Image: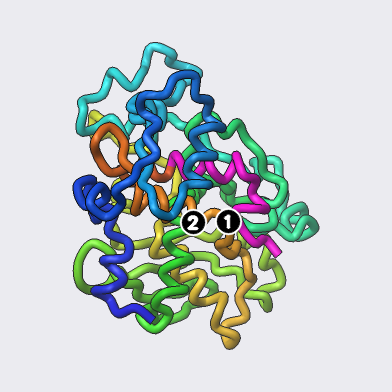
Amino acid sequence: MLNHESLRKYFNYQHPTPHGIRERYELSQDLSSKHGLTHADILDAIMTLNKNRYLVLPDSYERHLLEAEHPDHPEISLDNYRGATKHFHFWRYAPDVKLNTTEMSLEDAEKQRFSLKAAMRVASWNWTKPHRGFGVVDVRSGEYTLWPFLYILEGIKMQDLSPGLIHMDSTEGFDVVGRVPRLRGEGYEVVALKNVPYLYSGEPYVLSTQLHPVCQCKWILYGARRADTRRYRPGERTMCRHGVAFYEHLIEDPKERVLDGLPHLTGIINPWWVLKQKTILNGKKLTVTRMDSLIGMLIGFMGVKKAFDLS
């Protein structure tokens, strides 16, 4: 089990630096000067990278991973954003892989035994275009919860690496409060999971559509649909990595009897590690936003059932 300091180092996307990567791996697989590459060629290179090499992605991918089309406002483009805020365009306008719709009823959710991983089994999307994550509609309120691809991986991996650092503090009905380690500093984030799908509730699959966190982390405070003008789009909830880690923690505690609605990480882990540890784009490390975008493309390209164990 990793201690808190080791956990932070494990998830630190700033290290190794591009210079450190080049020093560690003398050989590279440089795609930046190759012409005629397809998206499949690039994703295949990530998945099959030799363990003794690092990867250099085409410079054009720095823009592609953030590009999104707004159907009602085609004039809005990535160029409308300043350099340091271009990632807002992705989080505001990129589509999600929607796992259910507002047409799903309470009865449908129970009959179909809805959970994140159950719905992922039949999910498909155009993986050549950037997507933010999986989307779930609350069948009671119609509110929407985004599960970013990267935070699903990070949250599950946090619990896997450091289960002793995650703590449950209190329960009130189907809302549970706990503490999850911060990954960008010392201390803990206090997170409340709302509508935890307890098996004894009588409607665990309905609750599975309603599950969302209330967390102290900045991601929850500011939201995924943040705009360059600092305006915020209401009506959307985001499952942060702390919420995912806490949910996984409850699932693995046999006393809690919580619906096992999360996938197990299998085929996606190695490509994620390649992106984190061995990939350079336009002379820089991948940002968290570009990581999320690429993870979604990789999951779609390899197939959800190869990326995860959904049993």
Q: What's the mark number on residue 190?
A: none
At mark 1, the secondary structure is loop
Q: Residue 91 magenta-drawn?
A: no
Q: In the rendering, at what x and y percent does residue 100 appear?
A: 66, 45
Three-letter code for the amino acid on which mark 2 is drawn? Asn
Q: Main secondary structure of the magenta part?
A: helix
- Is residue 227 at least partly visible in the picture? no
Q: In the current view of this chain or complex, which residue is farthest to the bottom?
A: 255
Q: Nearer the viewer, residue 276 or 172?
A: 276
Q: Residue 307 magenta-drawn?
A: yes
Residue at which label 2 appears: 270
Q: Nearer the viewer, residue 116 or 183?
A: 183
What residue lies at 36% left-to-right and 24% top-to-bottom?
33
Q: In the current view of this chain or complex, which residue is farthest to the top?
A: 75
Q: In the rendering, at what x and y percent does residue 47 appear?
A: 52, 46
Left or right: residue 36 versus residue 216 is right
Label 1 to label 2: alpha-carbon separation:
7 Å
Q: In the current view of this chain or complex, which residue is farthest to the front?
A: 26
Using the image, determine if residue 41 lies above or below residue 209: above
User: In terms of image quadrants, where is residue 201?
Assistant: bottom right
Q: Would you say the residues marked 1 and 2 are in contact, meaning their CB atoms lie under 8 Å apart?
A: yes
Q: Which residues are magenta?
A: 293-311
Left or right: residue 59 versus residue 303 is left
What residue lies at 39% left-to-right and 81% top-to-bottom?
1
What residue lies at 68% left-to-right and 78% top-to-bottom?
200
Q: What's the mark number on residue 267?
A: 1
Q: In the rendering, at what x and y percent does residue 308 appear?
A: 61, 57
